[in-house]
Amino acid sequence: MSQQSFKQAYETLQKHADTLRAQDEPNIDDLLTIVTESVSAYNVCKERIDAVEAAMEQAFSRVQDDDFAAASESDSADHVDSSDGNDDIPF
């Protein structure tokens, strides 16, 4: 099968699900084709979803690392000696 897009694969899954739901009796002659195409389409969708999740996790990890580094730098610059017992005063 040629390389499908997520949208094409998802449409295939929807079409086959609708076909199977609409049947009063299973059409055994078409079942193998439906299952084979559905499994292939599912794998395309899963690969795309996994790739997007991995990219998002990587992007969020970088943002969190940047935020942590910025917060650490800010904490170091804003650190006040609280040895005078006035820790609750923010200035």
Image (spheres, rainbow, N blue to C red):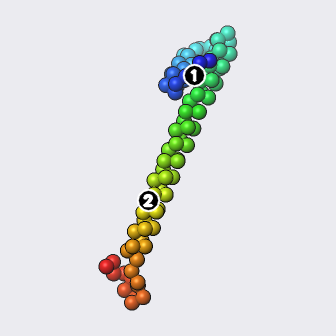
Quarter of the figure with residue 79: bottom left
Residue 44's spot in the image, x, y percent?
Answer: 58, 28
Q: Which residue sits furthest left?
A: 91
Q: Is residue 41 above or below residue 27?
A: below
Which numbered disc, 1 or 2, marks the residue that appears first in the sequence?
Answer: 1
Image-based side of 62 in relation to 1, left or right: left
Q: Nearer the viewer, residue 37 or 28?
A: 37
Q: Residues within 10 Å of mark 2 (few under 14, many from 20)?
A: few
Residue at position x 37%, y 86% in the image = 86
Going 52% across and 47% down the picture, which residue do you hit? 58
Q: Is residue 39 left or right of residue 72?
A: right
Task: Give the residue displayed 57% in from the left and 19% down from the top.
Answer: 16
Closest to the observer: 80 or 15? 80
Reading the image, the residue beneath label 2 is 67
Q: Which mark is residue 3?
A: 1
**Residue sitting at the far top:** 29
Instruction: Classify 9 as above or below 67.
Output: above
